[in-house]
Image: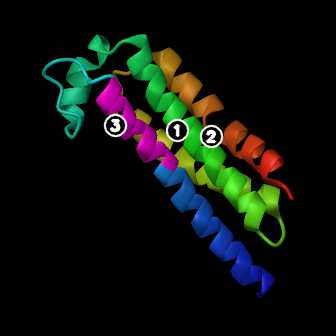
């Protein structure tokens, strides 16, 4: 397979893997730790109105979903890309970081510690770590 095509497919596989891990953990969290009473998780306004009612664990789980999803993306792209594995993994880290920035801007009432932890630790460092462990 041509190296460029292989890299493109590896990036797409990394995005899918990261999305599956992220959404899987978010859905599992919703089953194990339901949101506070009165929160509609499909309505950003409802989340913002009740974010102060979320427990530490309920806030930590989205961070873990973001971190492990980005880790999975970095791992997959580094494992299957033909070249530039670290660059591609970090590019996926930036891709997921942009989603994290969007989430932080949509939920401005979230605790500052959560926003900082999420944006600083869950994306670029986890993409790098995933890539390091995914190298052949």
Relative placement, left or right, of 67 versus 53 is right
In primary-sequence order, the first of circles 3 and 1 is 1
- Gap between marks 3 and 2, in whole Å? 18 Å
Instruction: Using the rendered view, name the quadrant where residue 7 is placed.
Output: bottom right
Q: Earlier in the sequence, mark 2 or mark 1?
A: 1
Q: Which residue is mark 1?
A: 66
User: From the viewer's perspective, is the residue at label 2 or at label 1 nearer?
Assistant: 1
The residue at 57%/54% (across/down) is 95
Of badges 3 and 1, nearer the viewer stands 1
Q: Nearer the viewer, residue 121 or 23?
A: 23
Residue topped by disc 3: 106
Q: Secondary structure at mark 3?
A: helix
User: Crowding at label 1, few (<14), some or many (≥20) Cα neighbours within 10 Å?
Assistant: many
Q: Is residue 32 left or right of residue 64?
A: left
**Where's the N terminus, which quadrant?**
bottom right
Residue at the bottom extreme?
A: 2
Label 2 and label 1: CA atoms lie apart by 7 Å
Q: Which residues are magenta?
A: 21-32
For disc 2, the neighbor class at 10 Å (few under 14, some 14 to 19, many from 20) is: many
Q: Is residue 2 magenta?
A: no
Q: Classify mark 3: residues with Cα within 10 Å, few (<14), some (14-19) or many (20+).
A: some
């Amino acid at each position: 397979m041509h190296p460029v095509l292989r890299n493109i497919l590896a990036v797409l596989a990394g995005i899918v893997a990261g999305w599956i891990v992220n959404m899987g953990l978010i859905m599992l969290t919703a089953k194990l730790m339901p949101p506070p009473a009165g929160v509609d998780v499909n309505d950003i306004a409802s989340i913002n109105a009740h974010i102060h009612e979320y427990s530490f664990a309920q806030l930590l789980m989205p961070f873990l979903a973001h971190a492990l999803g980005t880790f999975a993306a970095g791992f997959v792209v580094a494992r299957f890309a033909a070249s530039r594995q670290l660059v591609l993994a970090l590019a996926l880290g930036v891709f997921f970081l942009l989603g994290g920035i969007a989430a932080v801007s949509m939920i401005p009432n979230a605790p500052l510690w959560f926003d900082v932890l999420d944006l600083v630790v869950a994306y670029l460092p986890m993409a790098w770590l995933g890539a390091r462990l995914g190298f052949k």
